[in-house]
Image (spheres, rainbow, N blue to C red):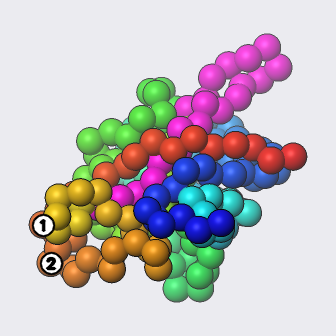
Amino acid sequence: MSNPSGSIHRIEFPCSVLKRIEDHVRTCYPEEACGVLLGYDANGGLITVTEFLPIKNTADQPLHAFTLHPAEWTSVVLTRPDLVGLFHSHPHTPPEPSAKDLAELEAFGSLLRIYAIGTPFRVSDGFRLKLATYEVTLPDHSGSIGHLNDNAGPAAPSPAHCRAQRYHLQPVPYASLR
């Protein structure tokens, strides 16, 4: 199925990947957890996440921020062509992008198709993760929202263009697969 607009309509996660993300958040709590999402674009507006790789949070204040461990992040960028997105947790706030998240997205947004944020909440048998998923977009020269890293979408913006404009995160629904 072709997707002429190039936009993402849905993101799919196997239950095993969601569990791995949840386990990583639990291990890192109360600090922010972070990692990368690996997968593929089905070229029909569907991204399928096949794997989650935790990355160490090296932020000076990890209770309220995340910084991807530079060597781990660089290794993923250079060796994993299946990089599709980034995940981090907001242990104490809703899973919505903060102003800091959006500002830091400028440094690596061109490498991502999707961005996910999770917030843990307590339930009787432990905790669960409220997950919010987003498509990474960048306004194109016409002022409309363009799509990144998609052969069907606009050409990748030049570095000067990236500095002049801000990346956006557009909410996209996700589904878990059994």
Mark 2 nearby-residue class (10 Å; few <14, some 14–19, many ≥20)? few
Residue 65 shows up from this direction: no
Q: Which mark is residue 160?
A: 2
Q: Are marks 1 and 2 in contact (CB under 8 Å)?
A: yes
Residue at (70% x, 28% y) in the render: 128
Q: Residues within 10 Å of mark 1 (few under 14, many from 20)?
A: few
Whether the magenta-drawn stretch holds residue 129 is answered as yes
- Image quadrant assignment for residue 142: bottom left
Residue 24, placed above or below residue 137: above
Residue 100: x %, y % from top left: 28, 46
Q: Does the magenta portion include 142?
A: no
Circle 1 — which element? helix
Residue found at the very far top of the displayed protein: 124
Please state the horizontal and vertical placement of residue 98, each as a whole percent of the image: 33, 39
User: Which label number is shown at residue 83?
Assistant: none
Q: Along the horizontal axis of the image, is 30 left or right of 109?
A: right
Q: Report the magenta stretch's main SS.
A: strand
Q: Secondary structure at mark 2?
A: helix
How far apart, in angstroms, are the residues tagged by discs 1 and 2?
A: 6 Å
Q: Which residue: 60% across, 63% down?
A: 44
In-image side of 122 versus 14 (left or right): left
- Residue located at (80% from left, 47% from top): 177
Q: Is residue 79 above or below residue 68?
A: below
Percent coordinates x, y for residue 101 in the rendering: 34, 48
Give the residue displayed 59% in from the left and 68% down from the top.
2
Q: Amino acid at mark 2?
A: Ala
Disc 1 marks which residue? 164
Q: Nearer the viewer, residue 149 or 54?
A: 149
Residue 152 appearing in the image: yes
Residue placed farthest to the bottom in the image? 78
Q: Which residues are magenta?
A: 119-138
Q: Locate residue 102, reporting x and y percent.
A: 30, 50
